[in-house]
Image (tube, rainbow, N blue to C red):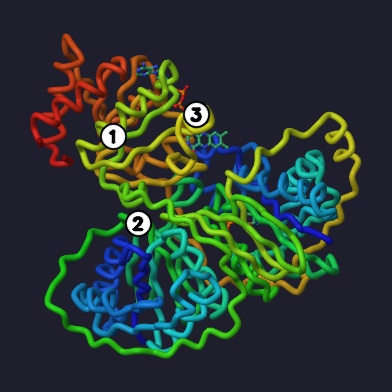
Amino acid sequence: MKVVVLIKQTPDTAELPKVSADDVRAGKVKATMVINPWDEYAAEEAIQLGDRFDFDSVAISMGSPEAVEALKHALAMGVGAAALVDNTALTGGDLFTTADALAAAIAAQGAVDLVLCGKQSVDDNGGAVYAGVAVKLGWPLVTGVTKIVDVANGRITVERLVEGGQEVLSVPLPAVVSVGKEINDPRYPSFMGIRKASKANIPATAAASLGVASGAGRTSWTNVRKPEERKSKVVMIDGASAQEKAAKLADALIAEKVI
Amino acid sequence: MSVLVWVEQTKSGPVASSWEVLGKGRQLADALGTQLVAAVIGGETAKTAEEATKYGADEVLTLTDGALADYRLSAYAAALTQAVGAAGATVVLAAGTTRGREVTAMVAAQLGAGLAPDAIDLKVDGGKLVAVRSVYSNNILADIVYSSAVQVASVRPRSFPMPEAGAAKGAVKAVAPNLGAVAEQIVEVRSTDTGEVSLTDASKIVSGGRGVAQDPAKGFALITELAGVLGAAVGASRAAVDAGYIPYKYQVGQTGKTVKPDLYIAAGISGAIQHLAGMGGSKVIVAINKDAEAPIFEKASYGIVGDLYEVVPALTTEFKKRIG
Ligand SMILES: Cc1cc2nc3c(=O)[nH]c(=O)nc-3n(C[C@H](O)[C@H](O)[C@H](O)COP(=O)(O)OP(=O)(O)OC[C@H]3O[C@@H](n4cnc5c(N)ncnc54)[C@H](O)[C@@H]3O)c2cc1C
Ligand SMILES: Nc1ncnc2c1ncn2[C@@H]1O[C@H](COP(=O)(O)O)[C@@H](O)[C@H]1O
């Protein structure tokens, strides 16, 4: 059996506040780029499925040629192979363009039983690409999975969390699954893993040769801007005792009508 | 043409943030000169449908079927896609709950429509929908414009005010669901509903961080007590979650929940960028920290330098005096 894990390269979360509107508009942010933190959970789960159910694992990313670094992180963790969809020449796309390209890259892998994704990307924050992938492939989607209970008889059984409840579901394979962070503790790449990954051959395919054309987006971003900074300067509440400070704060909050 | 809003319901009734979206839907429909249609999907739909007529829907479509009694994505996406057709909708909206986000994504994918996930504002420009999104973990804003005929968005809870309920006006119309094969089999559903205020819907939140390390059980007990007096939800930083003081579902921030309360009280939280990413949109932020140099004070509206084990119970006492 084979599992594909979808890995996006995203800015280091600590550097997100520095990302400028100009960079986003130009599609080139100046930040340290890392594996999308949510996708580490998907990569870890793919590796564990290898141990539990003998899955072969392949990491696929769409991005610039530099995105191979995120794939190498997955390889260094222990994912079996990797492939890049090079989107350098692709313009005017949106999240469904990404989904279409990823679906085509998954199909090109031959028989795939399962696709694992992160919960969302820390830059696009969509939590939506996997829906596009699932619909394009015609496979069921389960999101927010916190445990893979079993893979048997052509079905996968999973636990997931929704508001107010926890449910156990089973869907037929092949399927697309996004994982939540309760699912595992992603391992750090080992020294040996890093060495192996640095020598790995990662094939790159241009998005166009997967049949995905430029200008196909159904939405586009305009008026990209920084949110307004909080202007209010902090009011420090002083007092001789905790009681006195608490009393002053309570009065202030009631005066603000937030209580 | 119409604006269609999915009014989500759970076992405990309609989801409050759906009404926020329906209220906004009314304004958008008026700006577009079209009808506002609500869709209610479930095993039972009558009660929620009746309520929807009071929040400004011109028409309410009900899709009722035993197979919809328990939520399953493929079935709900099929039902909502059907409602879009029945309503001739060009704008499709839902509250950005876990379910609302995945259902709208599936419907947009199935219809070849554009999608704005987790929008924080909606407007009409030149007869088309424009959705404002907060991306790069709340560090960049962008307007999403659509080139597709159907325009889909999920809406972050608390982006719009709760509308006033008025006299019932819209007509309720049943649409027979045509669900096809439903992929998901439900093996078990465990309710974890403890009746507590959900973080994303909360208008007040009291959060604790690693500052409770000295006695985490007591620290969160004091925080929960303050939250109780204020009718607030309890939240936490990742450090508190990682240390096992409180479960992950309480985590606020980049890799937790994005919240937007009127009041956010952070006790023993330093104010790391990833925490601020989740709560920076709060109207009033109160920071309680024993370190006067803690970065949280730069983002706070009010600050108290002090020990949370003293300040939090003192606040509980003071609020009890004032609001009973
Ligand atoms: C990829 C990634 C994602 C992340 N996602 C999140 C996220 O979603 N949410 C999140 O919160 N963090 C997240 N983090 C972690 C974040 O960087 C911080 O480590 C975390 O927010 C710190 O939590 P804290 O403020 O509780 O702890 P600390 O930074 O240790 O701060 C504790 C504070 O408590 C104060 N204190 C101690 N004792 C007392 C006392 N008795 N009374 C009052 N004050 C006291 C201290 O002065 C200090 O300021 C993420 C990090 C990464 C790398
Ligand atoms: N460019 C990409 N390459 C590979 N995987 C992606 C890409 N974009 C999104 N994904 C996957 O889809 C998930 C959700 O992303 P998003 O919809 O952008 O929030 C991510 O966690 C990844 O697993």
Give the number of the disc on residue B239: 3
Label 3, label 1: how far apart the Cα atoms are: 19 Å
Whether discs 3 and 1 lie on one chain: the answer is: yes
Q: Is residue B232 visible?
A: yes
Q: Secondary structure at mark 2?
A: loop
Disc nearer the start of the sequence (3/2): 2
Whether discs 3 and 2 lie on one chain: the answer is: yes
Residue at mark 2: chain = B
Up-down: is A73 above or below B175? above
Where, quadrant-wise, is the C terminus of chain A in this rendering? top left
Image location (x, y in percent) of residue A30: 61, 40
Up-down: is A56 above or below A92? above
Up-down: is B179 above or below B224? below
Residue at mark 1: chain = B
Amino acid type, label 3: Ala
Residue wearing tag 1: B285
